[in-house]
Image (spheres, grey):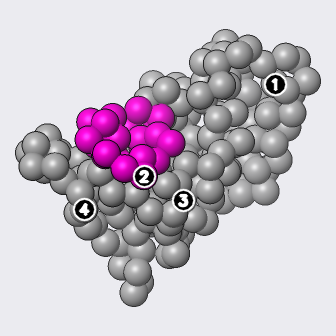
Amino acid sequence: MNTKAMNTNEREELLHALKSRFESNAHRHAGTAWADVRARLEGRPDALRSLREMEVTGGEPDVIDHDKQRGHITFWDRSAESPAGRRSACYDAEALDARKENKPANSAVETAAAMGIELTEQQYQRLQELGDFDTKTSRWVRTPSEVRAIAGALFCDRRYGRVLVHHHGAQSYYAARGFRGSLRV
């Protein structure tokens, strides 16, 4: 993850892109005003860095939920397919270390953690209620420890009009399998 601080132009460019997407997709977050979103982001440079990484890796983050009681606003990667800049990753560092040949550049779990994002299987199911995502790609999801203990990992996609959960070796990686995430601000 690019941890350097954003300059004023980079920050404003990111906020402009987020606002434009927010306004173009008002149906995704009815009842939430951009002013509330921006105010929430103003004091959170860590969140802006995470959103910048989501944006530059192709995630197209947008507001999906606004918990007005707690004040949280949640962004999700809304790209139609797993973000192009986050594909070809094995599941986690343990899987990456175990590969003897043809190692991918990174692992999904560690990269997502560095970006400050996550997406569970339940969140993925919720995302799929909002549209058809990952019809040509797939994405890793947080894997229960009992599955990971036997060298497996879970991934999801949408095929045949259904959201499917599959398993595979955590060391595997494919050009069409990546990860997407959510960020609560």
Q: Nearer the viewer, residue 144 or 175?
A: 175
Circle 2: is it few (<14), some (14-19), or many (20+) Cα within 10 Å? few
Q: Nearer the viewer, residue 56 or 80?
A: 56
Q: Which residue does the numbered mark 4 point to in the structure image?
A: 168
Q: How far separated are the C-alphas under marks 4 and 2?
A: 17 Å
Q: Secondary structure at mark 2?
A: loop
**For discs 3 and 4, the disc positioned in front in the rendered view:** 4
> Where's residue 32, x and y in %?
65, 41
Residue type for callout 3: Ser
Q: Which residue does the numbered mark 1 point to in the structure image?
A: 11
- Find residue 12 and report its image quarter: top right
Q: Nearer the viewer, residue 17 or 142?
A: 142
Q: Identify the residue at image location x=35%, y=72%.
A: 163
**For discs 2 and 3, the disc positioned in front in the rendered view:** 2
Q: How far separated are the C-alphas under marks 3 and 4?
A: 17 Å
Q: Are marks 4 and 2 in contact (CB under 8 Å)?
A: no
Q: Horizontally, is 152 left or right of 87 in the view?
A: left
Q: Which residue does the numbered mark 3 point to in the structure image?
A: 82
> Where's residue 92, x and y in %?
33, 39
**For discs 3 and 1, the disc positioned in front in the rendered view:** 3
Q: How far separated are the C-alphas under marks 2 and 1?
A: 37 Å
Q: Which residue does the numbered mark 2 point to in the structure image?
A: 102
Of labels 4 and 2, earlier in sequence is 2
122 in relation to 98, above or below: below
Q: How far separated are the C-alphas under marks 4 and 1?
A: 39 Å
Of labels 4 and 1, earlier in sequence is 1
Q: Horizontally, is 69 left or right of 125 in the view?
A: right
Q: How far separated are the C-alphas under marks 3 and 1?
A: 24 Å
